[in-house]
């Protein structure tokens, strides 16, 4: 199926390096570096570790030095039991870049990682060469919230029902019929419950609306047009708020577009990052209100 990821494909890349960085508050943040080429910081979703990127990391590592991290509270990072925020997660990412000696990187954030990336680009513009915001939102009063029935399905008392609801929001039925798991995008299974709650509050309290116009990096906003977990209507909000941002919607894709539709999404991201090398920001003509940027359905195949 063109446009979707083939079943059984492996994502193992040799020579991966795993290390820790220490933040200003003494929290140790585990991170994974692999691949070759210009640095690309990958930021995953809420309550997930660096493994969020396992299905597609190899596709990026062939052309980029990928840097992915375990948010505080997940994976091999410390798990302090105190409030977290998307701003703090962004500072943790800066600590990782500092530890690696990376002054400037391309940044690709999806879901909550896109929220973290907004703060990183706004507060540390000198650290972000180009920015990709996937399946995310600005947060706050301006964001489009998921529907009440979606919230109820995720809060089901039966954990199996809640898991099934989450998977149905992440992937299409056709994908799930072929791919039985394990899935790396539905939460870090070893994450303590208190940290999971801290992540939920941090993501829910995100509000970067006021700082979005200050983002100076060339920006691509990418979203599936059938995303109910983080409603697709958030994508044009972001693209219209960030000066010069480009908007792309992938037909039929749900929240985990980056995995299921990786054959479309990954080249789109890499092409954007490559074009940003020589494309001055002021010359970029793809404002969201002038360029709808939908991927033609015929490009996806059946």
Image (spheres, helix red, strand yellow):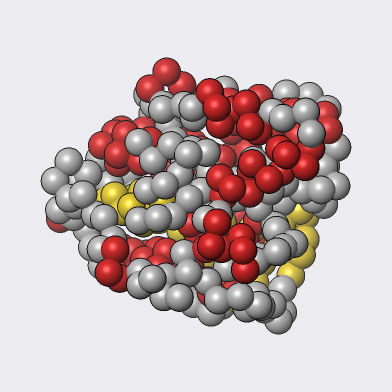
Q: Nearer the viewer, residue 58 or 98?
A: 58
Look at the image and tell me in which quarter the N terminus lies.
Answer: bottom left
Residue 277, image x, y percentages: 31, 67
Residue at x-position 32% and y-position 44%: 216
Residue 58, image x, y percentages: 59, 74
Residue 279 seen? yes
Residue 46, image x, y percentages: 64, 40
Residue 123, image x, y percentages: 46, 36
Residue at x-position 38% and y-position 71%: 302
Give the left or right position of residue 14, taking residue 9 as reference: right
Give the left or right position of residue 82, taking residue 237 as reference: right
Give the total number of marks visible in the rendering: 0
Query: Residue placed farthest to the top in the image?
Result: 141
Residue at x-position 36% and y-position 56%: 250
**Figure check: 101 above or below 211:** below
Residue 29 seen? no
**Figure check: 50 above or below 270:** above
Residue at x-position 82% and y-position 29%: 194
Residue 35 found in image quarter: bottom right
**Figure check: 133 above or below 11:** above
Give the left or right position of residue 17, taking residue 216 as reference: right
């Amino acid at each position: 199926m063109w446009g979707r990821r083939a079943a059984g494909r492996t994502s193992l890349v040799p020579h991966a390096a795993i290390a820790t960085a220490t933040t200003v508050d003494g929290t140790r943040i585990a991170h994974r570096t692999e691949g070759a080429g210009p640095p690309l910081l990958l930021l995953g979703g809420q309550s997930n570790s660096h493994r969020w990127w396992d299905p597609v990391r190899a596709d990026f590592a062939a052309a980029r030095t990928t840097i992915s991290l375990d948010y505080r509270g997940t994976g091999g990072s410390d798990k302090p039991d105190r409030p977290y925020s998307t701003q703090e997660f962004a500072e943790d990412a800066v600590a990782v870049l500092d530890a690696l000696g990376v002054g400037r990187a391309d940044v690709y954030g999806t879901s909550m990682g896109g929220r973290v990336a907004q703060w990183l680009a706004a507060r540390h513009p000198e650290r972000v060469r180009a920015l990709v915001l996937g399946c995310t939102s600005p947060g706050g009063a301006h964001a489009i919230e998921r529907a009440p029935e979606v919230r109820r399905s995720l809060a089901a008392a039966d954990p199996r029902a809640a898991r099934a609801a989450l998977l149905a929001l992440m992937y299409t039925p056709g994908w799930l019929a072929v791919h039985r798991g394990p899935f790396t995008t539905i939460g870090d299974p070893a994450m303590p419950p208190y940290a999971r709650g801290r992540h939920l509050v941090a993501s829910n309290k995100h509000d970067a609306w006021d700082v979005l116009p200050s983002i100076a990096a060339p920006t691509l906003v990418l979203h599936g047009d059938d995303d109910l977990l983080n409603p697709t209507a958030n994508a044009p909000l972001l693209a219209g708020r960030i000066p010069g941002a480009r908007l792309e919607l992938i037909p039929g894709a749900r929240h985990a577009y980056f995995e299921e539709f990786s054959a479309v999404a990954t080249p789109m991201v890499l092409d954007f990052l490559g074009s940003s090398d020589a494309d001055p920001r002021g010359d970029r003509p793809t404002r969201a209100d002038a360029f709808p940027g939908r991927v033609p359905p015929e490009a996806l195949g059946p």
